[in-house]
Amino acid sequence: RDYLLSHDADLVVNVVDAANLERNLYFTVQLLEMGVPLVLALNMMDVARKRGIRIDTAALSEKLGCPVVPVVATSGEGLSELQARMLSVADGIDSGGFPLALDESIEQALLEIEPLLQSDDPANRRWLALKLLEEDSDEGQTGEMTALLGELRHRIADRDGQETDLVIADSRYSHAHALA
């Protein structure tokens, strides 16, 4: 994750199993949260078609804000299109995606945390704020930040009836489910 946040990579190609789309989109949502330029490769489209699964790649691309390319890696189907879309994102011609909005209580908490974080990159600030809320990082925490995070977690738990990390995970799963 540190490498992805460094933005040393021009883009990330997220290869997902088209026949098990919902399960795989959770990671895609997390990549979008990190603000990395993304191309989504829907692999195993042949298997998906055999199972009667039809995926509207244009609609999925619109909802994610990044190119979505159907491929069958074993036969080479769609690989030239994938390469073209990779180049268009790397060259800045196509968008590489945008973070999906989380539950309202989480978004409100992020608005309070992000301005207090030290990062020139807004995507990194959002991601770090999310990790702090999830208790998955202690980067940049001061006594004041620790108190604020405790207050925000308490507010979220009171409003949503569950711990903050579960609210965030549920929000990601809801996105994956809705997209699938």
Image: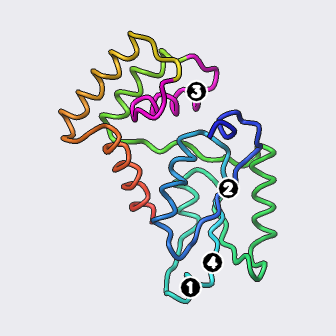
> At 81% across and 45% down in the image, what residue appears?
91
Q: Which mark is residue 49?
A: 1
Q: Distance between the Cα atoms at labels 3 and 4?
A: 35 Å
Q: Secondary structure at mark 3?
A: helix
Q: Which mark is residue 122?
A: 3
Q: Residue furthest bottom?
A: 50
> At 22% across and 35% down in the image, what residue appears?
157
Q: Secondary structure at mark 1?
A: helix
Q: Secondary structure at mark 4?
A: loop
Q: Distance between the Cα atoms at labels 3 and 1?
A: 39 Å
Figure quadrant of residue 3: top right
Q: Distance between the Cα atoms at labels 2 and 3?
A: 20 Å
Q: Residues within 10 Å of mark 4 (few under 14, many from 20)?
A: many
Which of the marked residues, 2 or 4, is nearer the chain's N terminus?
Answer: 2
Q: Secondary structure at mark 2?
A: strand
Q: Distance between the Cα atoms at labels 2 and 4?
A: 16 Å
Question: x and y percent of residue 159 in the render?
Answer: 19, 35
Q: Which residues are magenta?
A: 118-138
Residue with the mark numbered 4? 44
Question: x and y percent of residue 121 in the render?
Answer: 63, 26
> At 53% across and 54% down in the image, what residue appears?
27
Q: Which mark is residue 39?
A: 2
Q: Which mark is residue 131?
A: none
Quadrant holding the C terminus:
bottom left
